[in-house]
Amino acid sequence: MAKEDIQKETKESNSKGGGAEKEKQDKSAKNSDCDEANSEASKVPITIDPEEARFTNSGGKSEHMVVNFTAKRMAIKIRCGNALFRVEPTHMIVEPNKCRQLTINRMPGPIQTDKAIIQYIDIEKDVQDAKAAFKAADGAGTKIPYIKIKLVAGAGCGRKMSREVLEE
């Protein structure tokens, strides 16, 4: 058969039975575009769970998990400008695909809303001091990305507790 005849047969088979195959390929290409867009939105290097801390005006404690979703080690620095709030630890290293605990304590004080800033940078395997890594990044003029935790204090902002009465 001539080269032209083979190309003609291929076009005909694509238009008859191969059209469904082409449709599948087009749909899968569209789905992969959507998957890529969704995965781009989910490529946040770290997350904080929960993203909000609620306290009563008499103070309290809120525990959070810092999760590293990357294949790199991340140095974390937590800051809060309000004297009523204390965070432990202020610096930490989170290994790839691992999590660490963050505790936020609030002292008694007036009702208000504030925020904690969580800065993060990826670090090399040999780095052991997160605080030193941030000093080096600041000295180099590196722009450091961050996320926020909303800190809410109010009269009714404490933990919700169930007040069900069990009947015997």
Image (cartoon, helix red, strand yellow):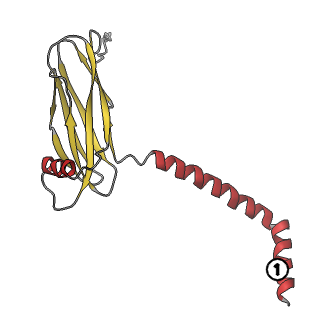
Q: Position of residue 126 (x, y in %)?
A: 16, 62
Quadrant where the image shows the N terminus: bottom right
Q: Tell whether 70 sits left or right of 17.
A: left
Quadrant where the image shows the C terminus: top left
Q: Residue at x 32, y 12 (%)?
A: 164
Q: Secondary structure at mark 1?
A: helix
Q: Residue at x 30, y 52 (%)?
A: 97
Is 81 located above or below residue 56 in the figure? below
- In the rendered image, is residue 116 in sight? yes
Q: Residue at x 24, y 11 (%)?
A: 111
Q: Residues within 10 Å of mark 1 (few under 14, many from 20)?
A: few
Q: Tell whether 12 sits left or right of 140.
A: right
- In the rendered image, is residue 153 in sight? no
Q: Position of residue 39 (x, y in %)?
A: 48, 49
Q: Nearer the viewer, residue 161 or 12?
A: 12
Q: Tell whether 28 sits left or right of 56.
A: right
Q: Residue at x 18, y 20 (%)?
A: 60
Q: How many badges with numbers are in the image?
A: 1
Is 63 located above or below residue 28 in the figure? above
Q: Position of residue 132 (x, y in %)?
A: 13, 50
Circle 1 is placed at which residue position? 7
Identified by mark 1, the residue type is: Gln
In this view, the residue farthest toward the bottom is 1
